[in-house]
Image (cartoon, rainbow, N blue to C red):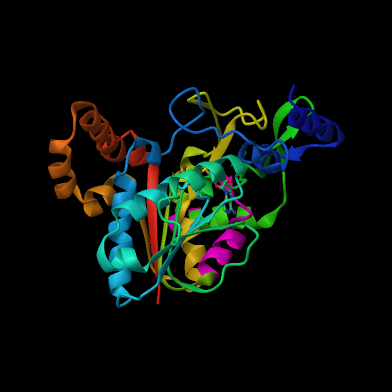
Amino acid sequence: MNPLAISIQTLALQGPIPASEVMALALYDPEHGYYRRAEGPWGFEGKDYYTALDLGPLLGQTIALRLEAAWKRLDRPSSFTVVEPGAGRGWLGRDLLASATGDFAEALRYIHRDDNPAARRHAEEALAPWPGKVHFASESESLRPFTGAVMSNELFDALPAQPWRFDGTRWTMEVLTASGPEWHASDESEPQAWFEGVMAAKGETLEASDGSIWCAALPRVVSTLAGALTRGLFLAIDYGDTAERLLAKGSDLRRFKGHTVDGKWWEDLGESDLTADVDFTRLASLLEREGLTETGHQELSKWIRTHAPLMAWEADWQKLPATDRMKRMENLLQLTLPGLMGARFRVLEAWRG
Ligand SMILES: C[S@@+](CC[C@H](N)C(=O)[O-])C[C@H]1O[C@@H](n2cnc3c(N)ncnc32)[C@H](O)[C@@H]1O
């Protein structure tokens, strides 16, 4: 057993630990947390998962167009700062900087914000071609007010989250005990009020096995990021769905290990990735509470079909060598076909100014 699993087992002997606390330690324990390890877990070969950025540049190119449109809407400021929390290897920043052109490219500044040490090393390499434009910030550094954009890919699904279930008469939350995972009754009122409000708005009552995920850190993270954005676009891409659909499916934590996925969040602590669906209804309402407007979210596949530079993509694609053409095709299909990434992910956009 690894040192983190041993210390969590010891803790569990003293009493049940909420799943969200286990997830926090498993991912962010300063010494043994999955996102604090010296070696990164990314990519296709022998690793735990890949993100849309591993598939090719289509996501970054599409975001570049959305950010350029935001820059134009702001009357083309001479400085347009893009903050990326959870920036990981910096590949989205790289794809954005590589596809921006003209005066927009001149105005672009990029801030990589992520304390993941393995990812940071990759990011320094990936972003090396733009030395004057890139700044690395730690997660604790306070953000100075800026005009531009906040963009993120798979940040919110990596925040510690707590599974909740309605058992027919009362609310329960998933905990880790010395003998394994269990559901224990809880009277913590805020998540329950949120879930019940969602059902009431739909005009329905709760049924046994309805349940969802509650991310306690969400208001703080949203407030830090949105609070510093004086004018511009907030754009988040993540696994997740509306509050209503998450409740209906009984959303739970997921474990990724060696490209397989299951619900055993209590196993291989610190050595496998844990993620939770993002409640986009709640994320949107928190952004609105911060004063952002025009908030909306949709499936990634629809967003890509609406905003991606598909005509240019087609022309470039024809000129590529055969293996690169195959990769580009896979990039496009993964982001657009139902059942693949395009349907499992959503894109949220909100506006300030
Ligand atoms: C699933 S990874 C995504 C990495 C990258 N965006 C990608 O798509 O490859 C989540 C990252 O979010 C980072 N993270 C978690 N909480 C954060 C926070 N509050 N601020 C900034 N980064 C955070 C983690 O360290 C981790 O590198």
- Pinpoint residue 160: horizontal percent, then vertical percent: 62, 46
Q: Is residue 241 visible?
A: no
Q: Residue at x 72, y 46 (%)?
A: 186
Q: Residue at x 45, y 50 (%)?
A: 128
- Quarter of the image where the C terminus is located: bottom left
- Pinpoint residue 18: horizontal percent, then vertical percent: 72, 41
Residue 100, magenta (yes or no) = no
- In front: 291, or 259? 259
In the visual, does 214 lie left or right of 57? right
Point out the stretch of residues depicted in magenta: 199-227
In the visual, does 73 lie left or right of 1? left
- Pinpoint residue 151: horizontal percent, then vertical percent: 43, 57
- In front: 257, or 77? 77
In the visual, does 103 lie left or right of 247? left
Q: Is residue 302 visible?
A: yes
Residue 204, magenta (yes or no) = yes
- In front: 250, or 134? 134
- Quarter of the image where the N terminus is located: top right
- Pinpoint residue 55: horizontal percent, then vertical percent: 35, 36
Q: Residue at x 28, y 68 (%)?
A: 103
Q: Could you tell me how many numbered marks the image carries?
A: 0
In the visual, does 68 lie left or right of 295? left
